[in-house]
Each structure stands twice: as C-alpha cells, then as structure tokens.
Image (tube, helix red, strand yellow):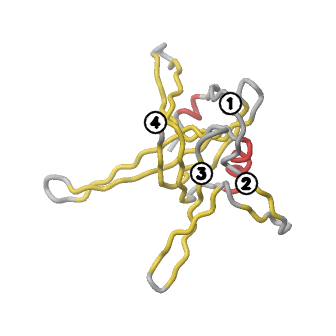
Amino acid sequence: MNKVILIGNVSRAPTTCLNQKGKEIATFFVETSHSWKDETGEWQSATDWHQVSVFRESTVRWVKDVLKRGDPVSVEGKLSYQYWTDKLGQSRSTPQVVITRAEGKVELFQFASNKNGKQFSNLNSNQNLANSNSEQEVLSSNSEENEEDVSFELSQEQIHPKQ
C-alpha cells in the first residue's frame, strides 16, 4: 500500500500547469513542523515542505477556488518521485504527494471556538461549496473516473520554491 497523510499549512498559493496531454494540474506545498527535546532538555523544532500534485479535475478546481497560502490542510495521496537532471548534469529526484483521478483527497481545516477551546471542523473537496452568488457547486474528489497519467514536467522554481 502506498498512502501518505499530511497535516500542515499551505506554504504558498497553489499554481496550475498543463501536463503533456493538456490536462490541468494543481501544485502546492504543505509545510509541516515537529518539535522534540534534545539531550540538554532544550526544545528543538524543524520544518519540512512537501510538494502536492493534484490531477483530478474537480479537485484541481477546488484547490484553485478555495486554497490559499497559510490555510491549514490535510492531504491524503500516494508518494511518488519526480526525476530530473540539475544544471551540473546530476540525476535528482523530488518526492511528491500525488492525488490522482482515482485516489486521494485534500481537506481544508477551519477552526471554531467553543467553551471547551478550539475544535477542528473541515471542509474538503468532496463537499458542496457556496460561491459568491450563493449557488452550490459539487466538487467531488472521489469521482469514479479512470486514473490518468501523472507524469509531467516541472520548472526548477516549482521543484525548488524560494522560501
């Protein structure tokens, strides 16, 4: 089984590009952090950035319409690697979480306060979203479409974002 679940924040606004077949792909990065106590008892922390590539058409629309930098999200997808050659001719690989037409999802966490403190609620790409005209559009991230080719070319800026 190849399954990755990340919970973190969108570290920059999602972008879109077209794959070789002309299908739109959304790409964004999720920032995750973790903390630990070192040998001296001091707290240390580290942050990682994870590339997420979305191939499902309805979820691409949802990502473009809803997600923005700083949003807390949960991402579920498959771990994949983008292989490329750097300026010095060295072979490199970049890990990415892939949401295909058949598998994966993105959820946007929203915080709601109550008397017991903050509670998580979430809005995901499976739920109805109200647009500015108060109409409802269903954006399903679990459609029964066939899985498509997930290979595509990324620019160096997409692979190595400036932080």
Element type where label 1 sits in the image: loop
Mark nearer the viewer, 3 or 1: 1
Q: Residue furthest top?
A: 89
- Above or below residue 10? Residue 84 is above
Element type where label 3 sits in the image: strand
Element type where label 2 sits in the image: helix
Q: CA distance from mark 4 to mark 3?
A: 19 Å
Provide the residue designation for mark 2.
65
> Which circle marks residue 131 in the picture?
none
Q: CA distance from mark 1 to mark 2?
A: 22 Å
Q: CA distance from mark 2 to mark 3?
A: 13 Å
Q: CA distance from mark 3 to mark 1?
A: 18 Å
Provide the residue designation for mark 3.
106
Mark 4 vs 3: CB contact within 8 A: no
Give the residue at x 57% y 37%.
98
Graded by Cα atoms within 10 Å as few (under 14), some (14 to 19) or many (20 or more), the crowding at tag 1 reads few
Q: Residue furthest front?
A: 144
Give, as a three-letter code, the residue at label 2.
Asp
Provide the residue designation for mark 4.
1
Graded by Cα atoms within 10 Å as few (under 14), some (14 to 19) or many (20 or more), the crowding at tag 3 reads many
Residue 105 located left or right of residue 163: right
Q: Residue furthest left?
A: 40
Give, as a three-letter code, the residue at label 4.
Met
Mark nearer the viewer, 4 or 2: 4
- Above or below residue 69? Residue 94 is above
Give, as a three-letter code, the residue at label 1.
Glu
Q: Earlier in the sequence, mark 4 or mark 2?
A: 4
- Above or below residue 158? Residue 142 is below
